[in-house]
Image (tube, rainbow, N blue to C red):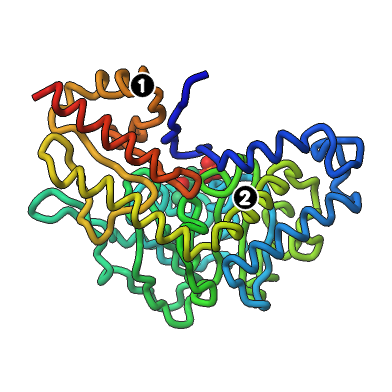
């Protein structure tokens, strides 16, 4: 098999060391004679896997002791429902700072099913047609149960680098696609949600990091599996957790620690994304529709100036082993996802390909 470079947005490439380790242990986990997916979630072996993963996550993100970490299923989408159900009383309202596709989905889920979600449009286009984040719109309203924000809009390629101050109103953030790509101050947030599949593991597991005082307020009819206080009480084993993803998450956290933690990964992600954006900005063959200050470091979204070449661009790339660069269906264009596991070589290869394609289509 020849080398394939995988730029899919999620599920996405994982570190080869992690994949190999999982393969090695798949049929016989640490001499137990059975594989991890065959084990009871209550076994001594799995309990250790689960606890070690949580401890590493706490260490890597510096999670304060008054925050619970919940290991769940149902994805980001499940949490779009869990957030209002856990935090907004019947008849209450919340503020949604919308900067792209996923925050709009979260707003819709709340507004159409659970209660008033006030829409704050926080992404606008400037006179050059480039999108920028309008931070001045991120203001909470009187009596709001929480404010909601997605820190990295995976589809639009927009990332929030300035965390708004919402005062006493808890700020709930979706970090599905940028968790562990940069250091964050967890204490600024009421809760952080993310799925593993964009940066730190395979699909199947969602994690919620939540401040303890926000637990215990869920509506009565909240499904137990979405009730954060139930999950906290049962240490994420109220129902059978996705044991394989939990284990794989732990292997990824270990890998991140071995590289020097999230500070080191941030450095790498800055270097990788800069290389790609610098090239895009140096030519008029490709266009970025996001202003430099708000560009995502992990989802590089761009278009070809001549969009009639889109199919050929994707097809030729695939023939060279570069896959997953087609943009999300709601936006079109191209997207290269260059998460933690993508080495700088993968970005160099992509830039070389883009140069070559541009030269062949002058
Ligand atoms: C992928 C993604 C989601 C949706 O996650 P699912 O696990 O498919 O429900 C939500 N938010 C962001 C930012 C994402 O990138």
Q: Kindly indicate whether the residue at mark 1 contacts the one at mark 2 (C-beta within 8 angstroms).
A: no
Can residue 341 be spotted in the picture? yes
Rendered residue at 55%/54% (across/down): 194
Can residue 112 be spotted in the picture? no
Looking at the image, residue 136 lies above or below residue 30: below
| Image mark for residue 252 | 2
Rendered residue at 54%/46% (across/down): 77
Q: Nearer the viewer, residue 119 or 164?
A: 164
Residue under label 1: 320
Q: Could you tell me residue 167's position as x and y percent?
A: 43, 82
Rendered residue at 43%/54% (across/down): 107
Q: Could you tell me residue 342's position as x and y percent?
A: 45, 43
Regarding mark 1 in the picture, which secondary structure is present there?
loop
Q: Is residue 348 left or right of residue 235?
A: left
Foreground mark, 2 or 1, reads 1
Which is more N-terminal, label 1 or label 2? Answer: 2
Query: Residue 220, located in which quarter of the rendered image?
Result: bottom right
Q: Is residue 214 left or right of residue 234?
A: left
């Amino acid at each position: 098999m020849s080398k394939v470079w995988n730029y899919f947005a999620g599920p996405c490439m994982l570190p080869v060391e992690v994949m190999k380790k999982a393969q090695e242990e798949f049929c016989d986990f640490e001499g137990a004679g059975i594989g991890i997916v065959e084990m009871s979630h209550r076994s001594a072996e799995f309990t250790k896997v689960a606890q070690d993963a949580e401890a590493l996550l706490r260490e890597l993100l510096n999670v304060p002791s008054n925050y619970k970490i919940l290991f769940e299923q149902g994805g980001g989408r499940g949490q779009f429902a869990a957030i209002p159900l856990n935090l907004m009383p019947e008849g209450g309202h919340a503020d949604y700072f919308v900067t792209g596709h996923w925050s709009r989905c979260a707003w819709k889920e709340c507004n159409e099913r659970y209660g008033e979600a006030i829409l704050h449009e926080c992404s606008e286009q400037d006179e050059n047609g480039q999108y920028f984040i309008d931070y001045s719109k991120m203001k909470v309203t009187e009596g709001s149960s929480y404010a909601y924000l997605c820190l990295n809009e995976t589809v639009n390629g927009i990332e929030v680098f300035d965390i708004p101050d919402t005062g006493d109103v808890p700020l709930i953030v979706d970090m599905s696609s940028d968790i562990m790509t940069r250091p964050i101050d967890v204490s600024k947030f009421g809760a952080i949600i993310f799925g593993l599949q964009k940066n730190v593991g395979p699909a199947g597991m969602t994690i919620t990091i939540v401040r303890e005082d926000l637990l215990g307020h869920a509506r009565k009819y909240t499904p137990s599996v979405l009730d954060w206080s139930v999950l906290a009480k049962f240490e994420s084993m109220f129902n059978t957790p996705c044991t394989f993803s939990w284990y794989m998450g732990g292997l990824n956290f270990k890998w991140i620690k071995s590289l020097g933690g999230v500070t080191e990964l941030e450095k790498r992600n800055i270097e990788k994304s800069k290389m790609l954006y610098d090239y895009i900005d140096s030519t008029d063959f490709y266009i970025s529709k996001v202003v430099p200050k708000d560009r995502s470091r992990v989802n590089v979204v761009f278009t070809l100036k001549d969009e009639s070449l889109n199919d050929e661009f994707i097809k030729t790339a695939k023939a060279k082993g570069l896959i997953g660069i087609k943009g999300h269906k709601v936006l079109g264009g191209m997207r290269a996802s260059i998460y933690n596991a993508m080495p700088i070589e993968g970005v160099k290869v992509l830039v070389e390909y883009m140069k070559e394609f541009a030269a062949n289509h002058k």
